[in-house]
Structure formats: structure tokens, C-alpha cells
Image: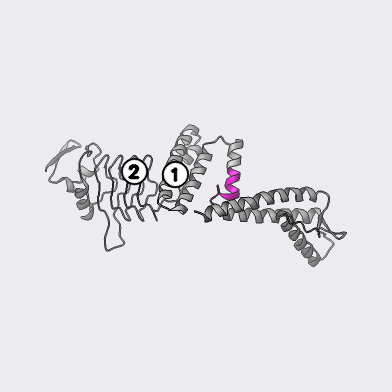
């Protein structure tokens, strides 16, 4: 089949659609309704560069772009695959960096170990797609654009990008959950919550509460944060007790510049012990807060009871998936 293209006023004859560079990269050529899977396979496997190819609405169902017998991978980086049909496509280790899969049909596609950094996944159908071990990058494309717009003062534009990023994260979370990839689902749930927070007004009460939940437990996905926050709070309160003083059998444990280093270290260890038993609400009664340290003890006991309950909830949530 011969295809004629006019580029810059010159007539270009391509003997075969499957071998024409202009055909694959020209966005003005309508590729919808055509089964191009076999032709594209031949072009890529022959070593031709398909980075930046224009494949809008192309029918690539069942295409096999697996580089067998080698660790090398084929590349469709920066390719435009808007509304492309990639159902049942074999894309193991494919490089799709900065490509557009907007509204593409990727159902049942094999995307194991694929590189999807900065890929536009808005509206992409991923039902049944194998997305384990995919390389997502540090930030999704729309998250990166949203942050860039926010830093430039384009508030409404940034909110639009964050809304789109939230939608993408929600879609990926649901796909991961259906496949039993709960760690991956947890990651996308965390990103979804962050994108939702970014849409809230700056310095608003809702955004502050959302940030606090993130710091304390990572929206229920970071049990280690609960432990780190607890240890930090115990340490801070212990230092307050060391400055304000607590009582041990009528003797005051407090930082004293006139005392020896050993005496101060002994007092510090004891007030840290008091901070631990106060945080865990054990309250043995061998040490008693004095004056202003009572306020610190009350706050620590409240925060401690709340944090311990939070840790149980987050830990059970992670372990029972």
C-alpha cells in the first residue's frame, strides 16, 4: 500500500505504512479504525525510533512489544496514544516516559516493569491491567504541573491539575485493590489524599487538620510515623520536665547549672522515664509533676492516649489487608 504525504511542500511516497517514519509521527494522519499492531511491531523491532510517535485512536489491540531474551526494552517515550486501543497489549518493560495515555483503553494489558514516569493517565481504562512493579516516578504528571502552577500563582489552574491527579490516583488505587496489590493501593490512596489536601484553601482549618493527619499517620498508611511522632513528643515533654522540674519523694529533679554533669544526666534519665509513663498513661506515682509541669503532663497524657489508639488502628489496617 502506498501512502503519499505532503510535508513542507514536498511530496513524499512511502512504500509501506509499517516502515514510514512520516506516517507514524505525523499527527495529521488519521489512524483510527486501523489495526496497526502488526505494522508497529515490525517497525519497532526493526530498530526504528518511535519516540514521540503520533498514535491517536490507533487500534493496537494485542500488540506485542516484549523484547525477548534480553534486558533491553522498547521505547514509546513521549508518544501520543490518546484514545488508543491497547487492550491485551504485551508491554513488558516498555518505556512510556512522558507519553500520553489519556482515555486510552489499556484493559488486560501487561505493564509489568513498564516505565510510566510523567505519563498522562487521565481517563485511561486500566481494568485488569498488570501494573505490578511499574516505575511511576516521584510525582505524577498532573501533580507536578499542579505544584508548578501553584508556585507561579495560577491558583485555579493548579486546583484543576490536582483534581485530575486525584482522579488518576483513585483509579489506580481501585485497580490495585482489585488485583490484591494492597501496598500499591495504599501508596495511591496516600497520594489521593495529598492531592485532595492541595485543593483546599491555603491556611484553612480543613487543610491544617488534613496536614496533621498526614504528619501523625500518613492518612493511615504510615504506621512508622505514629512511632516517630510518639518518640519525638516524649522527648520534647521530657525536656520541658527537665526545665520545669518534677518531684521524686520530696526531691526536685530539675536542670541545675550548679550540679555536676553526672547529677544532671541522672535527673534527665529520670524525667525521661516520667515522660514515658505519662505518655503511656501508666502513672506509677513514684514521680510527680510540679507547678507548670502539670500542664505539660496533662497534655502529654491526652496526646499519648490518642496516639496509642491511633497506632493500633493504623497497624491493624495495614496487617489485615
Magenta-span inclusion, residue 176 = no
Report the number of numbered marks: 2
Q: Residue at x 25, y 53 (%)?
A: 64
Task: In the displayed orientation, state which residue is furthest to the bottom.
Answer: 262
Left or right? Give the position of 4 relative to 216: left
Q: Position of residue 181 (x, y in %)?
A: 43, 53
* Residue occupied by mark 1: 169
Magenta-span inclusion, residue 215 = yes
Q: Is residue 222 visible?
A: no
Q: CA distance from mark 1 to mark 2?
A: 15 Å
Q: Residues within 10 Å of mark 2 (few under 14, many from 20)?
A: many
Q: Nearer the viewer, residue 282 or 151?
A: 282
Q: Secondary structure at mark 1?
A: helix
Identify the image's colour scheme: rainbow, by chain, secondary structure or one colour.
one colour
Q: Earlier in the sequence, mark 1 or mark 2?
A: 2
* Circles 1 and 2 in contact, beta carbons < 8 Å: no
Using the image, determine if residue 165 lies above or below residue 266: above
Q: Residue at x 46, y 50 (%)?
A: 185
Task: In the displayed orientation, state which residue is furthest to the right.
Answer: 250
Q: Position of residue 162 (x, y in %)?
A: 47, 39
Res. 68 mark: none
Q: Quadrant of residue 267?
A: bottom right
Q: Nearer the viewer, residue 306 or 168?
A: 306
Left or right? Give the position of 4 relative to 98: left
Q: Secondary structure at mark 2?
A: loop
* Residue occupied by mark 2: 101
Q: Residue at x 20, y 41 (%)?
A: 34
Using the image, determine if residue 296 lies above or below residue 162: below
Magenta residues, start to end: 211-222
Q: Position of residue 45 (x, y in %)?
A: 22, 55
Q: Residues within 10 Å of mark 1 (few under 14, many from 20)?
A: many
Q: Is residue 217 visible?
A: yes
Amino acid at each position: 500500500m502506498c501512502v503519499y504525504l505532503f510535508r513542507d511542500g514536498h511530496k513524499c511516497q512511502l512504500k509501506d505504512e509499517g516502515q514510514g517514519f512520516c506516517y507514524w509521527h505525523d499527527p495529521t494522519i488519521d489512524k483510527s479504525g486501523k489495526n496497526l499492531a502488526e505494522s508497529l511491531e515490525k517497525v519497532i523491532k526493526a530498530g526504528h525510533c518511535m519516540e514521540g510517535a503520533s498514535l491517536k485512536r490507533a487500534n493496537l489491540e494485542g500488540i506485542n512489544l516484549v523484547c525477548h531474551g534480553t534486558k533491553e526494552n522498547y521505547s514509546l517515550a513521549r508518544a501520543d496514544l490518546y484514545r488508543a486501543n491497547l487492550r491485551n497489549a504485551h508491554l513488558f518493560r516498555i518505556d512510556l516516559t512522558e507519553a500520553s495515555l489519556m482515555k486510552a483503553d489499556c484493559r488486560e494489558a501487561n505493564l509489568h516493569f513498564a516505565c510510566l514516569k510523567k505519563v498522562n493517565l487521565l481517563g485511561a481504562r486500566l481494568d485488569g491491567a498488570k501494573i505490578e512493579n511499574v516505575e511511576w516516578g516521584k510525582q505524577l504528571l498532573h501533580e507536578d504541573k499542579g505544584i508548578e502552577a501553584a508556585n507561579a500563582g495560577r491558583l485555579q489552574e493548579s486546583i484543576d491539575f490536582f483534581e485530575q491527579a486525584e482522579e488518576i490516583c483513585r483509579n489506580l488505587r481501585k485497580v490495585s485493590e482489585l488485583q490484591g496489590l494492597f501496598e500499591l493501593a495504599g501508596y495511591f490512596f496516600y497520594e489521593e489524599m495529598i492531592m485532595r489536601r492541595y485543593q483546599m484553601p491555603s491556611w484553612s482549618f480543613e487543610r491544617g487538620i488534613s496536614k496533621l493527619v498526614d504528619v501523625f499517620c500518613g492518612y493511615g498508611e504510615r504506621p512508622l510515623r505514629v512511632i516517630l511522632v510518639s518518640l519525638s513528643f516524649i522527648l520534647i515533654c521530657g525536656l520541658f520536665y527537665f526545665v520545669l522540674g518534677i518531684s521524686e519523694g520530696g526531691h526536685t529533679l530539675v536542670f541545675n547549672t550548679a550540679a555536676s554533669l553526672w547529677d544532671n544526666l541522672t535527673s534527665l534519665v529520670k524525667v525521661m522515664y516520667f515522660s514515658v509513663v505519662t505518655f503511656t498513661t501508666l502513672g506509677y506515682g513514684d514521680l510527680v509533676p510540679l507547678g507548670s509541669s502539670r500542664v505539660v503532663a496533662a497534655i502529654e497524657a491526652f496526646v499519648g492516649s490518642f496516639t496509642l489508639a491511633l497506632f493500633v488502628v493504623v497497624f491493624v489496617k495495614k496487617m489485615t489487608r
